[in-house]
Image (cartoon, rainbow, N blue to C red):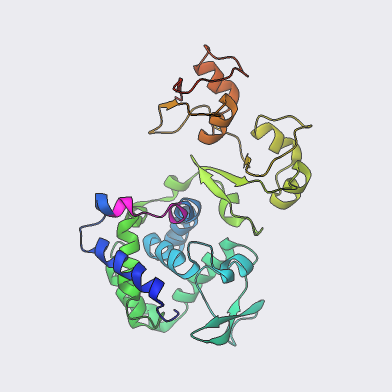
């Protein structure tokens, strides 16, 4: 919604160059942003859920979330859980905050968690007559939706439709328009309902955080709502363990094996069986069962090959 800066102009050129090809190409794939992919993996279940409830293509919801929130990294999103840049007009009865937009201070809506922002985004579109024509389109017509949002006045930026389309095609967001409830059954709601300020990532469908200096099982339990006992168990640790900055801390049970396409892992300098189990979200005991030639605390050699599934 803001004016283009030189940086955003460069981004626009990259996005448009990718949209000239049919869906994603290998060159566009290489330009993918890891932060964007993490955002997609975290929020696609709720985007699909909103599509099922309100008829808005999941691809459009995800693309708008990526663009408006800077993949969850904008100040407005981090402080107020506002993923879509929706302003707080006179009809808004909830909390609000001020933020700069087009060179002036504006009021924006504040949400308790990301889920509320996604739900309000759906209601924002469904409840306004100017967006009514969009709901007559096929839910797989993401190009029509992207152009229709701009025409209806959602954004001032003339390049807004192309940016949405390019994101959808680069990250293959259109595939989520074919998802149903069964495709998101069992996904962790914690990944998108968590109300803390820290980033939650997903690996193999499992939510995890990166520990900071000073974190303890007690403080993380209070922050995430996952009990201290479960945090210890989920991460194959012991109650006396002192959490270090950079540790991967899973917030749900790890898997019995790595998910596809990971079959093997070739070790590098400094890796251990435990660090590998954390990297792929595999229970340490199950990793040992698949690789009985290694002992629990054996020092791995560079080039050792471990079976992951």
Q: Main secondary structure of the magenta part?
A: helix
Q: Residue furthest left?
A: 21
Q: Position of residue 214 (x, y in %)?
A: 75, 48
Position above or below: 53 against 102: above
- Residue that appears at 54% across and 70% down: 120
Residue 168 quadrant: bottom left
- The magenta segment is 28-37
Q: Can residue 286 be seen from the camera position used here?
A: yes
Position above or below: 54 against 264: below
Position above or below: 138 against 126: above
Camera-side residue of 167 and 272: 272
Camera-side residue of 215 and 97: 215
Residue 87 horizontal side relative to residue 265, left or right: right
Residue 53 horizontal side relative to residue 110, left or right: left
Q: Is residue 81 magenta?
A: no
Q: Position of residue 138 (x, y in %)?
A: 29, 65
- Residue that appears at 30% across and 75% down: 147
Q: Can residue 138 be seen from the camera position used here?
A: no
Position above or below: 206 against 15: above
Camera-side residue of 233 and 138: 233
Q: Position of residue 298 (x, y in %)?
A: 59, 17
Residue 77 quadrant: bottom right
Residue 128 horizontal side relative to residue 24, left or right: right
């Amino acid at each position: 919604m803001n004016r283009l800066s030189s940086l955003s102009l460069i981004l626009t050129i990259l996005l448009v160059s990718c949209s000239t090809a049919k869906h994603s190409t290998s060159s566009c794939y290489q330009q993918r942003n890891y932060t964007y992919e993490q955002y997609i993996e975290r929020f696609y279940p709720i985007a699909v859920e909103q599509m099922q409830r309100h008829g808005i293509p999941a691809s459009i919801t995800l693309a708008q979330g990526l663009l408006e929130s800077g993949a969850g990294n904008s100040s407005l999103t981090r402080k107020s859980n506002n993923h879509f840049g929706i302003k707080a007009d006179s009809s808004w009865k909830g909390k609000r905050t001020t933020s700069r937009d087009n060179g002036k201070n504006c009021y924006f809506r504040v949400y308790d968690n990301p889920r509320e922002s996604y739900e309000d985004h759906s209601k924002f579109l469904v409840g306004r007559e100017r967006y009514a024509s969009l709901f007559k389109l096929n839910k797989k017509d993401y190009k029509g939706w992207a152009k229709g949002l701009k025409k209806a006045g959602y954004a001032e930026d003339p390049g807004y439709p192309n940016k949405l389309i390019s994101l959808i095609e680069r990250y293959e967001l259109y595939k989520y328009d074919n998802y149903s409830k069964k495709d998101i059954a069992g996904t962790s709601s914690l990944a998108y309902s968590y109300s803390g300020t820290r980033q939650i990532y997903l690996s193999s469908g499992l939510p995890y955080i990166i520990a900071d200096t000073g974190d303890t099982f007690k403080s993380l339990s209070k922050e995430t709502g996952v009990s201290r006992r479960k945090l210890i168990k989920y991460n194959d640790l012991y109650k006396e363990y002192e959490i270090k900055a950079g540790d991967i801390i899973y917030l749900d049970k790890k898997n019995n094996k790595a998910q596809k396409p990971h079959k093997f892992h070739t070790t590098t300098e400094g890796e251990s069986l435990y660090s590998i189990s954390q990297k792929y979200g595999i229970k340490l005991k199950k990793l040992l069962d698949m690789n009985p030639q290694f002992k629990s605390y054996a020092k791995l050699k560079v080039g050792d090959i471990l079976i992951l599934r």
